[in-house]
Amino acid sequence: MERHEDMGFGDGPSRRQILGAGALAVAGAAVSSAVWTPPAAAAAAAKSPAIFYSPHQDDEAIGMAGSILEHKAAGRPVHLVLVSRGENDGLAKIMNQGDCTTLGSRCSAPGHRHALGWPEDGASKVVAARTAEFTLSAKALGVDKVINFNLADGAYGDYDAFVGQVVKKVRALAEQYPGASHKFAAGWLDGNATHKACSDAAHRLMKNGELTDVRFHHIYAYQQYPPAERDRGAAYVLRIPSAQMERKRKSILAYNTWDPSRNLYSLGYHSVPEWLEQAYADPREFVYTLPSNYRPGR
């Protein structure tokens, strides 16, 4: 069976409050369900997790956190997977620039300055710091287990090989957790090669009959469309209850926390600040099924 790196651990504030956020206080999730489920089905679901696949660090906070909390509130175990390492040489350059010209006064670094001297290979320092933010986000959401596929983010290189790697990893989890549901990025909508590779992997496994309970989250809806148009074509619009939305906001703030002692440098906010802020403000998420005319490939 394929082995994964297990990282497990068993309206809202203003923009100014977002920017000034530090360490997160993690509240416990209330357990409730508004939908009756037959006892046998409920027992089976309780043993089978909902598995969420985040292509990069921050995707889970932007477009999956509400659904994660929905499953937790219904008493379902939730496993959160980080698919790729998230190498990014552009972020390394930003963190070396000195005065923060990227974000200016929106930068959460003291004095809006960071000259960290990181290697600009996009890997050694950036990956570790981005993953620290991901772990903090996962703790804010109260997931039951975090799994790191630790795949080099190669979808913009040998795309087919990367899809094959994701297929192998997801297949192993499906075998390990029979009856699990699987939640991916809606890569055909997001327009990102890594996201598309994840939905291609799901498509291949669904076509082979290896996955049956599958949904897709349009993570980039907050960047691509104004609020009134974000639900276009969605099979399901999740309207996040206020208490759960507060927890989603805490997961977003994990990406705007400056605490070098914990390897936290607000990298998510230096990368996609507008997307994070739009997701922070919109108490909805957009869930899709795979289109009948789905076409794999980058």
Image: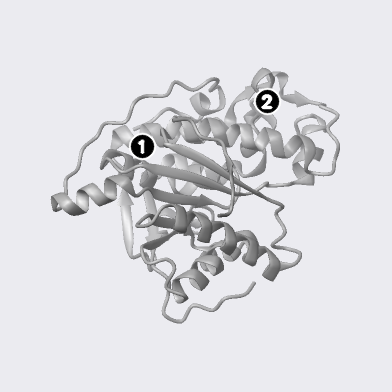
Q: Are marks 1 and 2 in contact (CB under 8 Å)?
A: no
Residue found at the very far front of the displayed protein = 1
Q: Is residue 134 above or below residue 151?
A: above
Mark 1, residue position: 245
Q: Amino acid at mark 1?
A: Met
Single out the mark in the foreground, 1 or 2.
2
Residue found at the very far bottom of the displayed protein = 293
* Residue depicted at x 85% and y 41%: 120
Q: CA distance from mark 1 to mark 2?
A: 26 Å
Out of 255 and 53, give the one closest to the viewer.
53
Q: Amino acid at mark 2?
A: Asn
Out of 32 and 252, give the one closest to the viewer.
32
Q: Is residue 243 above or below residue 113?
A: below
- 49 on left or right of 112: left
Q: Horizontal and vertical percent for residue 142?
A: 41, 32
Q: Horizontal and vertical percent for residue 101?
A: 76, 35
User: If the image is split into quadrants, where does the C terminus sit?
Assistant: bottom right
Disc 1 residue crowd, few under 14, some 14–19, many 20+, Cα 10 Å: many
* Location of residue 133 by image quarter: top right
* Location of residue 190 by image quarter: bottom right
What colouring method underlies this structural image? one colour
Disc 2 residue crowd, few under 14, some 14–19, many 20+, Cα 10 Å: some
Q: Horizontal and vertical percent for residue 99?
A: 79, 28
Mark 2, residue position: 263
Out of 274 and 23, give the one closest to the viewer.
23
- 189 on left or right of 39: right
Q: Secondary structure under badge 1?
A: helix
Q: Is residue 194 above or below residue 106?
A: below
* Residue depicted at x 43% and y 40%: 281
